[in-house]
Image: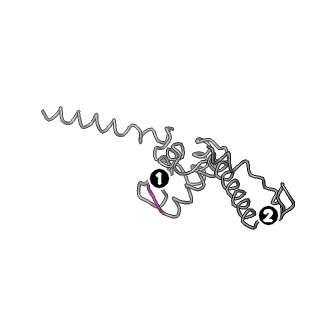
Amino acid sequence: MTAILWILSVDFSFRKTSLQNDAPLLPRTNIISSIRFLLVLLLVTNLSLASSFNEQTPEVQNIFKQVLCTTCAGQSIAESDTNIARFLRKTIIDMLNEGKSTNQIKSYLVKNYGEQILTSPPINPYTYFLWASPFILLIMMIYLSCKKK
């Protein structure tokens, strides 16, 4: 914290003479002022980038796990390292930084790539059988095993 305060207290005037007398400043002093200026610039840049989304943010990772890679067999874009997965990850991060919600991002992806891009398809009349099939198979297996006995 004290280092940040020290950097922020820098005089960035790049004056050619000292304040006490009109003696010229040593070149080293100008270099130190330049270094301090660059440090403050880096600090401000990093603080502005810290507020944006990146791939390590839990919200972003959650979305990545819900989106399938279009060229990989059953792999989410969080696990894949293909070009399309990198492109989709960048697209999602850009949309989040623009202020889009998770549902808006999913709608965009479904509109452009179809419902097969999502790891869990939405429940609608077209997918009722898909969602019900595990339960139907379980009931059939129980029925057949009881019938044999």
User: Which residue ends up furthest to the bottom in the rendered image?
Assistant: 27
At a point 76% along the width and 66% down the height, the residue shown is: 26
Quadrant of the image containing the N terminus? top right
| Relative height, residue 14 to residue 56 (above, below) | below
Quadrant of the image containing the C terminus? top left
Residue 136: x and y in percent read: 33, 36
At a point 69% along the width and 60% down the height, the residue shown is: 35
Crowd class of label 2 (few under 14; some 14 to 19; many from 20; radius 10 Å): some
Residue 54: x and y in percent read: 57, 50
Residue 46: x and y in percent read: 64, 52
Name which residue type carries label 2.
Leu
Name which residue type carries label 1.
Ala
Residue 25's disc is 2
Closer to viewer: mark 2 or mark 1: 2
10 is within the stretch colored magenta: no
Q: Which of the 4 image quadrants contains residue 99?
A: top right
